[in-house]
C-alpha cells in the first residue's frame, strides 16, 4: 500500500539525513530507516570507519546509503554537504539532528571554550542544519525534523550543567520551530532519552550502571533501538499531527 505525503512520495522514495550517524543511537536510527528501503545519509566528522560500517549494514538491507563528512560547527561545510546530497539525489525529506557531545564536571571548572564548543555541537548545529535542510521541506510542503535531546534537558543534572542547558535549549528550539513550520506541512519534535547503553556510558563502572538500573522502574537502560523506534514513528506520514513535542523514552525514570 502506498503511503502518501504532501509531495505524494512513498516511504521508499524518501531520504533521511542522520547527523552523528556513526554512533550508537545514530547508527540504530539509520538502520531503522534503511529497513523500509529509505535513502539514508550518514553524517560523521571523525569516525569514518564507523560511519562506513553503518552504511554497509544499511546497504545490506537493500537501502540506498551514503556517508557525508562535515564539521557541524562550520556553516560552509554544512552548505557543501547539502550540495553534495542534492547532487547525489539524497536531499533529505527527514532530518535527524542526532550529533551531540557530553561533558561531565562541575560548572566552576568549566571554561568559556568548553561551554562554547558544547553549545556549538549540541545546539547551534541543530539550528544550522534545520535552517539549511528545511528549505526543501517547506518547498515541497512536507518534512520531518527530529531532534535528539536528553532527559537532562527536561530535569537538569548535577555536574552536567552545560550539557543540560544545551539540551534544554534544543527542547525550546523544537517547540518554537514547530509553530513556524506547521503551516508548511513540516513537523518538528524532540526525542529526549534517559540513560542509553552507548559509548557515552563507557566511563561508568559496572557498579554505577547497576545502581542506575535500580533507579529505573523498567529495570534496565535503554537500547539504541528503543530510541530509533520512536524516531521512526515520528517520521511517518501518519504522525503528521504530532509536532512541537518533547517525548522522553526513559523507562519511567523521569516523569
Image (cartoon, rainbow, N blue to C red):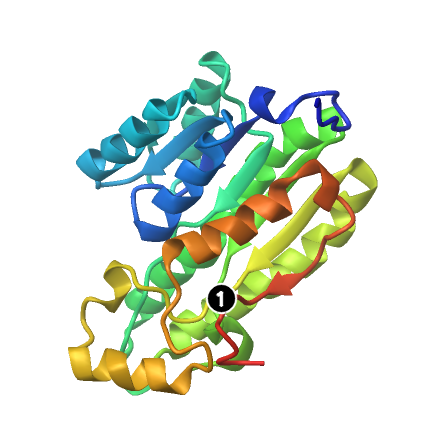
Quadrant placement of the N terminus: top right
- Looking at the image, residue 202 sits to the left or right of residue 168; the answer is left
The x and y percentages for residue 31 are 40, 37
> Height in image: 180 above or below 105?
above
Quadrant placement of the C terminus: bottom right
Residue 109 seen by the camera: no
Q: Secondary structure at mark 1?
A: helix
> Height in image: 77 above or below 171?
above
Binning the other alpha carbons within 10 Å of mark 1 as few (below 14), some (14 to 19) or many (20 upward) gives many
- Looking at the image, residue 245 sits to the left or right of residue 127; the answer is right
Q: Please give the residue where the numbered disc 1 appears in the rendered image.
A: 167
In terms of image quadrants, where is residue 9? top right
Residue at the (55%, 53%) spot, across then down: 230
> Height in image: 42 above or below 223?
above
- Looking at the image, residue 54 sits to the left or right of residue 144; the answer is left
Residue at the (55%, 66%) spot, across then down: 169
Residue at the (73%, 41%) spot, across then down: 238
Residue at the (42%, 57%) spot, across then down: 122
Residue 80 seen by the camera: yes
- 118 or 242, nearer to the observer: 242
In terms of image quadrants, where is residue 34? top left
Count of numbered marks: 1
In terms of image quadrants, where is residue 161? bottom left
Farthest residue in the right direction? 183
The x and y percentages for residue 72 are 39, 43
Amino acid at each position: 500500500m502506498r503511503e502518501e505525503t504532501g509531495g505524494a512520495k512513498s516511504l521508499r522514495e524518501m531520504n533521511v539525513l542522520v547527523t552523528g550517524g556513526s554512533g550508537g543511537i545514530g547508527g540504530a536510527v539509520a538502520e531503522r530507516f534503511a529497513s523500509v528501503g529509505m535513502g539514508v545519509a550518514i553524517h560523521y566528522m571523525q569516525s569514518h570507519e564507523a560511519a562506513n560500517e553503518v552504511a554497509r549494514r544499511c546497504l545490506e538491507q537493500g537501502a540506498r546509503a551514503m556517508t557525508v563528512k562535515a564539521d557541524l560547527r562550520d556553516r560552509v561545510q554544512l552548505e557543501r554537504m547539502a550540495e553534495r546530497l542534492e547532487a547525489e539525489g539524497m536531499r533529505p525529506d527527514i532530518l535527524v539532528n542526532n550529533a551531540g557531545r557530553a561533558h561531565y564536571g562541575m560548572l566552576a571548572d568549566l571554561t568559556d571554550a568548553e561551554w562554547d564548543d558544547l553549545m556549538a555541537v549540541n545546539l547551534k548545529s541543530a539550528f544550522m542544519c534545520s535552517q539549511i535542510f528545511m528549505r526543501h521541506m517547506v518547498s515541497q510542503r512536507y518534512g520531518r525534523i527530529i531532534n535528539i535531546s536528553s532527559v537532562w534537558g527536561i530535569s537538569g543534572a548535577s555536574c552536567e550543567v552545560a550539557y543540560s542547558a544545551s539540551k534544554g535549549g534544543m527542547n525550546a528550539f523544537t517547540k518554537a520551530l514547530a509553530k513556524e513550520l506547521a503551516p508548511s506541512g513540516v513537523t518538528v519534535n524532540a526525542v529526549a532519552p534517559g540513560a542509553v547503553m552507548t559509548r557515552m556510558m563507557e566511563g561508568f563502572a559496572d557498579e554505577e550502571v547497576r545502581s542506575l538500573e535500580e533507579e529505573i522502574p523498567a529495570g534496565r537502560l535503554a537500547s539504541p533501538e528503543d530510541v530509533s523506534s520512536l524516531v521512526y514513528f515520528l517520521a511517518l506520514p501518519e504522525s503528521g499531527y504530532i509536532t512541537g513535542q518533547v517525548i522522553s523514552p526513559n523507562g519511567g525514570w523521569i516523569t
